[in-house]
Amino acid sequence: MYSGFWKRLCAYIIDGIILYVASVILGSVFTMFEYLLMIPFALNLTQFTDSIVWVTLGFRGLLIVVTGWLYYAFMESSKWKATLGKLATGSVVVDERNERISFARASGRYWSKLISVCTLYVGFIMAGFTQKKQALHDMIAKTYVVDKNVLELQANGYGNADVTQI
C-alpha cells in the first residue's frame, strides 16, 4: 500500500521539527566558533571584519542546506529506507523493485523537491491525486513511499500484500 498525502505530510512535519532542532544546535555551536573567530578582528578593527562576517553568514546558510540534504539522502538510502518522520508514520522509500534506494537516487529525490517548491508546491500535492501516491520528486527519481508493514509482509511472503497493485 502506498503512503498517501496526509501520512507523508505528517512525516514531513516531523522531519521539519527534527531539522529545525538540529539547525538550532548546529547554529549555536557555529555561533560560538564565529565569535571566537571575530575576536582578533574586532580588537584590531581591520577592514577584513566585514568580509569575515559575510563569509561566516554564507557558510551558515550552506551548513543549513547541506544538513537537510544529508539528513534526507543518508536516511532514505540507509537500511531503514526512511527519515525519522517516515519511520514514525510507518513509511519507507523504495525503488520500482521495492528495494532500498542508493545515496545518489536519494540525493536526486531530495534536490528535485526544488521543482515542487518552484511550482507553488503543486509537485507535493500531486501525491494526493496520483495512482501510486507519487509526488513530482518521486516520479523524477522513480521512487515510491510505501507502508513499511505491507512491504515487510510482502518480503516475507505472507498474505496478499502486493504493494504494486494496491
Image (cartoon, rainbow, N blue to C red):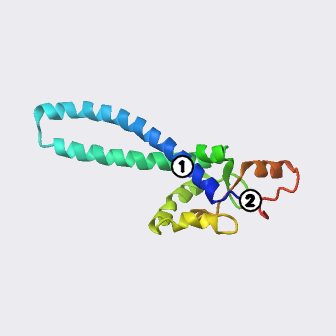
Please indicate whether residue 64 sits to the left or right of residue 37 in the image. Answer: right
**Where is residue 115 drawn, in percent x and y?**
49, 66
Q: Residue at x 28, y 35 (%)?
A: 34
Amino acid type, callout 1: Ile
Q: Residue at x 49, y 50 (%)?
A: 69
In the foreground, 116 or 104:
116
Q: Is residue 128 above or below residue 152?
A: below
**Where is residue 163 drawn, in percent x and y?**
77, 59
Q: Is residue 83 visible?
A: no
Query: Label 2 belongs to which residue?
Result: 97
Q: Residues within 10 Å of mark 1 (few under 14, many from 20)?
A: few
Query: How many numbered markers are drawn?
Result: 2
Q: Residue at x 59, y 46 (%)?
A: 85
Please indicate whether residue 43 sits to the left or right of residue 126 in the image. Answer: left
State if disc 2 and disc 1 touch (CB < 8 Å).
Answer: no
**Where is residue 70 drawn, in percent x and y?**
51, 47
**Where is residue 78 drawn, in percent x and y?**
63, 45
**Residue furthest front in the image:** 6
* Quadrant location, the C terminus: bottom right
Check disc 1 and report its element: helix, strand or loop. helix
Q: Residues within 10 Å of mark 2 (few under 14, many from 20)?
A: few
Q: Is residue 61 visible?
A: yes
Check disc 2 and report its element: helix, strand or loop. loop
**Rendered image: mark on residue 13:** 1
Please indicate whether residue 163 sits to the left or right of residue 43 in the image. Answer: right
Amino acid type, callout 2: Arg
